Image (spheres, coloured by chain):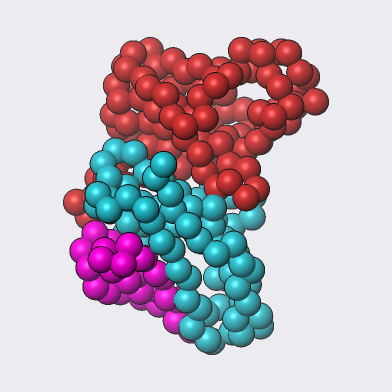
Amino acid sequence: DAGITQSPRHKVTETGTPVTLRCHQTENHRYMYWYRQDPGHGLRLIHYSYGVKDTDKGEVSDGYSVSRSKTEDFLLTLESATSSQTSVYFCAISATSGGLDTQYFGPGTRLTVL
Amino acid sequence: QKEVEQNSGPLSVPEGAIASLNCTYSDRGSQSFFWYRQYSGKSPELIMSIYSNGDKEDGRFTAQLNKASQYVSLLIRDSQPSDSATYLCAVSGGFKTIFGAGTRLFVKA
């Protein structure tokens, strides 16, 4: 357990509504990530952060924005949710393990957009 | 585009057998390699990491790396029904990691 929590764990929303997912970590890790996981695609990086107010895009960032105002919190926002954003969202942190930068995952948020 | 390829499976093995999971990657600059296990409805959990050519053993698990062939494998000895899960191969060149889509393993009791 890397001290990562995600909220909410499950959410059902309607097309066009804004949605914010929260990732919270307790161990002061610098790097944080948001992934989505869909059948046949594996984990795909949406956005990542390398410090407070420092973020960058991943491979599937369209339709998503992020913010990190505190080290412990990384927020993912869907400004206007679409059905294609129905997915399982995982937050991760990077920590050094055995000399390697290794990613550890939160429990996930299952988002359904109707 | 950097890619990590895995056979989606399912790979079915009898209890007590060796399960062999394979992964290839496209970026020759990759430095670190990982295997994660993911049970249905759960998040991925790290089971092995490796960064140098050869074998690395941890209990019933052995990770094998061949950088010349851009190939990573995971062997699970004495497979148990509790090993039934999806196994994700991951490849990293720094602070960003690319994940394969995973191989589903089914261990028959």
Q: Colour of chain A?
A: red
In the rendered image, residue A87 lying in the magenta stretch gets the answer: no
In the rendered image, residue B53 lying in the magenta stretch gets the answer: yes
Pick the quarter of the image with the N terminus of chain B: top left
- Tell me the residue at 59%/57% (across/down): B39
A85 or A67, nearer to the observer: A85
Task: Indicate whether A12 appears above or below B10.
Answer: above
Q: Colour of chain B?
A: cyan
**How far across and how far down the image is residue B6, in percent?**
50, 61
Question: Number of numbered discs present?
Answer: 0
Task: Indicate whether B107 appears above or below A7.
Answer: below
Q: Is residue A8 left or right of residue B89?
A: right
Tell me if residue B35 can be seen: no
- Tell me the residue at 24%/73% (across/down): B54
B69 or A25, nearer to the observer: B69
* Magenta residues (range): B50-78
- Tell me the residue at 55%/70% (across/down): B83
* Predominant SS along the magenta part: strand
Pick the quarter of the image with the C terminus of chain B: bottom right
- Tell me the residue at 54%/53% (across/down): B101
Q: Is residue B66 left or right of residue B60?
A: left
Name which quarter of the figure residue B33 lies in.
Answer: bottom left
A85 or A24, nearer to the observer: A85
Tell me if residue B75 can be seen: yes
